[in-house]
Amino acid sequence: MNFSPYHDLGNGDVLFLLQGAGRTILLTLFAGLIASILGLALGWLRFVSRLARILTGPFVDVLRSVPLLVLLILVGTFVGILGIDLDPFSLAIGVLALYAAAFASEIARAGFGSVDARTRKAARALGMGAGQEVRHILLPLAARVVFPAWLGLLLALVKDTALVSTVGYMELMKSSQVVVTQTNAPFVVFAVSGLLYFLICYPCSVYGQRVEARMKHDLAP
Amino acid sequence: MTFDYEFHWRTVLEDLPDLLAGALVTLEVTGLSIAAGVPLAIALGALLRGPAATRVPARCFVEAARNTPCLFQIYLFYYGLGALGINLSSFLVAVIAISLNNAGYLADTYRSALQAVPVQQRSAARSLGMTFGQTSFHVVLPLMARIVYLPTVNQMIWAMLNSSLGTLIGLRELTGVTQFVQSRSFRTLEFFLATAGLYYLLAKALMAAASLYGRRLTREAR
Amino acid sequence: MGRWNSAAALALLSLWMAPPALADKIDDVVKAGQVRCGVMLDFPPAGFRGQGNEPDGFDVQTCKDIAQALGVKSVVVETSSSDRVPALVANRIDVLIASTSPTLERAKTVAFTVPYTAYTNVILTRVDGGIKSFDDLKGRSVGGVTGTTTEAVMLAGLQGWGQGRDKYTGYGTEIDSYVALSQGKVDGLVVSNTVGSVLGQTPQFKNLAVIGNAPGAADLCAIAVNKRDGELLRWLNLFLWQQTRSGRYAELYKKYFGLGTPPALTADGTY
């Protein structure tokens, strides 16, 4: 037999895991960007309009009560049946973005709600238009408040990407499974991939905590 | 875009008892992992308030739990421990891994809750003749309960969602049963739509149960 | 006026609902210049990733042969055993070449070709497990892969012993079940003879061994396509007939499974 499905753990495998980690980061950035934009729009709608809140309520509610794994399988099957030709990367980003958008919209809504109505009125009294007030007062103030929560969402997204191999995309988790398949060395492989996840998440998490602490300090009376 | 698919709902109805049995396992994993996760989180919270000797290891654990995917943690406990010759059942691994995950996410909440009960209040209770146990149960815990109630309920929902990952190590909870029964007929869409519906109902039921319990907690704390 | 509006709406709706121009799947594949095959890449030697993580194996090579015959590029899409048919129904792949047994239940959802390969089911255990026959597995922890025919053989065994499913663990992928067996989480699996012959020879799984055949007849496997792709199905049947007649089937079988003469793709007493 001139082929080999199995081999011992080597440098090539570590490189393969690093590539997987790169794809995990790429997925997170794309999905995070789309989720933030969607979430901001949805959160704004839900903040200003009761009707929008009632109409979009079920969307947010359902997405938050169904496991991502089930959602991936469902959306993957549904998109296929509709005959939409999506590669695994786009499909994974689509589902992750949709899922995260549900959480992002709640974060955004909380952010808008945190801005004191009197501050906004004061801005209008100074002669700002509605658009100006949103751009120069509401958005910057809300952004400051929700930044740590938003960073938390991105971190959750990094961890959520571990499931997208369900729709055929090979990120870090799937890469480690492939290497386990070839080497039967699960402990070492999972130790390496765990470390890679940690290295991606931990710096962001520490930064988020710093910002949050500084904000508490700033906002303290 | 064309929608060229016939729904076969009867297949799902026939397998509904299996799905419900799976939902029960989902509830078991959720319940056990919260029941074990909360005491662990309290312990971690206490360790995090202690000297460096206890704070540093506890902090390491919390950061590891919070900065790696839950699926990774489940795999690590299943195949990683297996490589060391420790073989636990899928159910046990799911419960342990999700309990530890819950504890990691709740530790800081419980730490601040422990901080929030002023020492004076505790000494006051003790000076009224209450024992340490009485103080803990009648003063400290009810006061903490109000702070930790919402985060704990949220974590319980997360635990339920995370339990679906058990299917990847062979656990027959709701998602696992769905995978199994749909593989017989391959009516994937119908089965997973039904399962999504069941998860939604489970989440609502858990929230309702929690709010009943929560009302009692806050009444006691008054 | 209102009537005209609704008539227009109806016309639009029927346009939208109408099936697209009747190009069949072969036309689609040729136009796209690629055929997407769903293959289980955790099922060596039928499907696996080689040293450079390139897909290889009997099923992968069959996909390449199909692509060559169609004059298009082959794209291998990894599908786990439980994701095989969903991937097909969801149109993520054009053909499924993943050691799938053509059961009547499944054939209600997808369409199967004539058999393209055959497996015998064998019992895989650990060398030190003390299991000598299928019946020795009675009362022991056993495993399988969710949604496979080998799982069905194991579950039938459990039923025969009057046992419930509490000692059975169904894994998501083939390799997960091998790792679980090798670690001692389960004491026995039913696997294909082709898998067993390779596993026992590899240093990574040297504690595993095949101890004999599992109950039941040989497992004939078929390629599957979407139920509505009749033209493609007919083309594939012809392709498979050519594949056997030209000796390519025997060549691939020997190369990947290393087992000599390939089994006949027929059943006793019928075609």
Image (cartoon, rainbow, N blue to C red):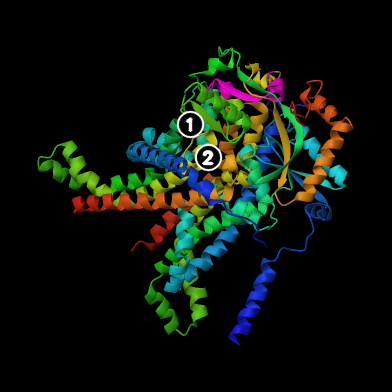
Residue numbers of the magenta segment: C181-200
Q: What element carries label 2?
A: helix
- Compared to B11, does B50 lie above or below? above
Q: In this view, does A32 lie above or below A188?
A: below
On the image, the x and y values in percent for residue A139 come to 49, 70
Specify whether residue C184 is painted magenta. Answer: yes
Is residue B102 visible to us here?
yes
- The x, y position of residue B130, in whole percent, is 12, 40
Q: Which residue lies furthest to the right in this view?
A: C246
Residue C178 locus on image (x, y percent): 61, 26
Tell me if mark 1 has few (under 14), some (14-19) or many (20+) residues whose alpha carbon lies within 10 angstroms of its own.
many
Label placed on residue B134: none
Q: Do the residues labelled 1 and 2 touch (CB within 8 Å)?
A: no
Whether residue A100 is situated above or below residue C203 in the rendered picture: below
Image position of B207 (left or right of B125)? right
Q: Amino acid type of disc 1?
A: Ser
Observer-nearest of C123 and A139: C123
Q: Residue at x 85, y 48 (%)?
A: C72
**Viewer-nearest residue: A197 or C262:** C262
Q: Please, which chain is the residue tagged with disc 1 on?
A: B
Which quarter of the image is occupied by the N terminus of chain C?
bottom right
Mark 1 vs mark 2: in front: 1
Q: Name the residue under label 1.
A: B90
| Nearest the eye: C89 or A21 | C89
Is A197 contained in the magenta span? Answer: no
| Amino acid at dot 2 | Leu
**Is C21 on the left or on the right of B66, as rendered?**
right
Q: Please tell me how many numbered marks the rendered image carries.
A: 2
> With B202 as the anchor, is C16 left or right in this view?
right
Task: Quickly name the residue at label 2.
Answer: B71
